[in-house]
């Protein structure tokens, strides 16, 4: 039973990085300038590196398959990522705001996993913490530049925050698997992460001259396998090669 729960916990962690990594990969060649374009592409590669670690371990626990089969050969209902990471790249402000809301959560998550009783997860957390810290610095600085920039950049950032903030609640809505992993000292305590997330986001919102809306949380059940209309299009892209050419090797 523990192995089954750990497997699902690895999917939950890996799927978030997989889908957000894909969203960022869509921006390759479309950044507002060369430096930012390369930075966002590197963010994507960092996330895919974490995905490989999660899914290699998941395949080992399952006793079958590979990181590729875990990543590409599941049905939509079997993906456990939150709705936030599925949101489209509407404009640069949406990209940055989505990234910041995620990064403010991801860094304390990695710090928590570093203390996991599971040695493999602790190693993933130790490597991911350095990457997540850089990602948070990057998105935080861009939040300030957009929010305290021109009238247009401020308007776009506030619009992005109005849309995306309600999806962030799902990050901290503890699933049964997350609760079990927390109690066994393997997974993170989302309550503690929420405290750090609030402090980080409130500081940056203040510096960016934007404020979150008081809209109620989005009805989001990504951790239970229920996704937005965007997910099907995402999977159609990332699964194409594996489904068109099963078991292909380079």
Image (cartoon, grey):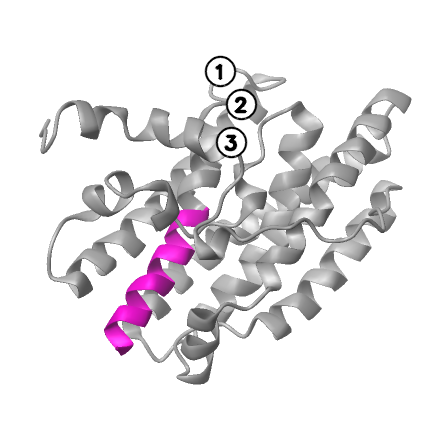
Q: Which mark is residue 230?
A: 3
- In primary-sequence order, the first of circles 2 and 1 is 1
- In primary-sequence order, the first of circles 3 and 1 is 1
Q: Nearer the viewer, residue 44 or 34?
A: 44
- In primary-sequence order, the first of circles 2 and 3 is 2
Q: Which mark is residue 37?
A: 2
Q: Nearer the viewer, residue 3 or 114?
A: 3
Magenta extent: 1-16
Q: Residue at x 76, y 39 (%)?
A: 161
Q: Residue at x 75, y 63 (%)?
A: 199
Determine which quarter of the picture holds residue 1. bottom left
For residue 94, side relative to residue 35 (left or right): right
Q: Residue at x 64, y 24 (%)?
A: 90
Relative vertical location of residue 127 with respect to residue 143 in this rendering, above or below: below
Callout 3 secondary element: helix
For residue 242, side relative to residue 222 (left or right): left
The 10 Å Cα crowd at callout 2, few under 14, some 14 to 19, many 20 or more, is: some
Measured Cα–Cα span from mark 2 to mark 3: 23 Å
Instruction: Return the residue at label 1.
Output: 29
| Numbered disc in front, either 2 or 3 | 3
For residue 234, side relative to residue 2 (left or right): right
Check if mark 2's residue and mark 1's residue have beta carbons within 8 Å: yes
Measured Cα–Cα span from mark 2 to mark 1: 6 Å
């Amino acid at each position: 039973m523990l192995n089954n729960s750990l497997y699902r916990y690895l999917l939950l962690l890996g799927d978030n990085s997989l889908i957000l990594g894909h969203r960022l990969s869509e921006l390759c060649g479309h950044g507002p300038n060369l430096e930012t374009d390369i930075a966002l592409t590197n963010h994507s590669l960092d996330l895919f590196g974490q995905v490989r670690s999660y899914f290699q371990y998941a395949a080992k626990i399952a006793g079958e398959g590979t990181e590729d089969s875990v990543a590409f050969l599941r049905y939509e209902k079997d993906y456990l990522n939150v709705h936030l990471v599925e949101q489209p790249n509407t404009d640069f402000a949406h990209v940055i705001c989505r990234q910041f809301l995620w990064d403010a959560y991801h860094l304390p998550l990695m710090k928590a996993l570093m203390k996991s009783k599971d040695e493999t997860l602790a190693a993933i957390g130790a490597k991911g913490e350095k990457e997540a810290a850089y990602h948070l610095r990057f998105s935080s600085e861009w939040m300030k530049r957009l929010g305290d920039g021109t009238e247009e950049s401020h308007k776009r950032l506030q619009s992005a925050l109005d849309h995306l903030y309600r999806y962030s609640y799902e990050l901290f809505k503890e699933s049964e698997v997350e609760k079990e992993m927390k109690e066994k000292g393997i997974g993170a305590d989302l309550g503690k992460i929420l405290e750090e997330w609030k402090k980080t986001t409130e500081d940056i919102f203040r510096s960016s001259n934007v404020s979150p809306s008081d809209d109620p949380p989005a009805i989001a059940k990504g951790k239970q396998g229920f996704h937005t209309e965007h997910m099907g299009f995402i999977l159609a892209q990332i699964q194409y090669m594996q489904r068109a050419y099963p078991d292909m090797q380079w």
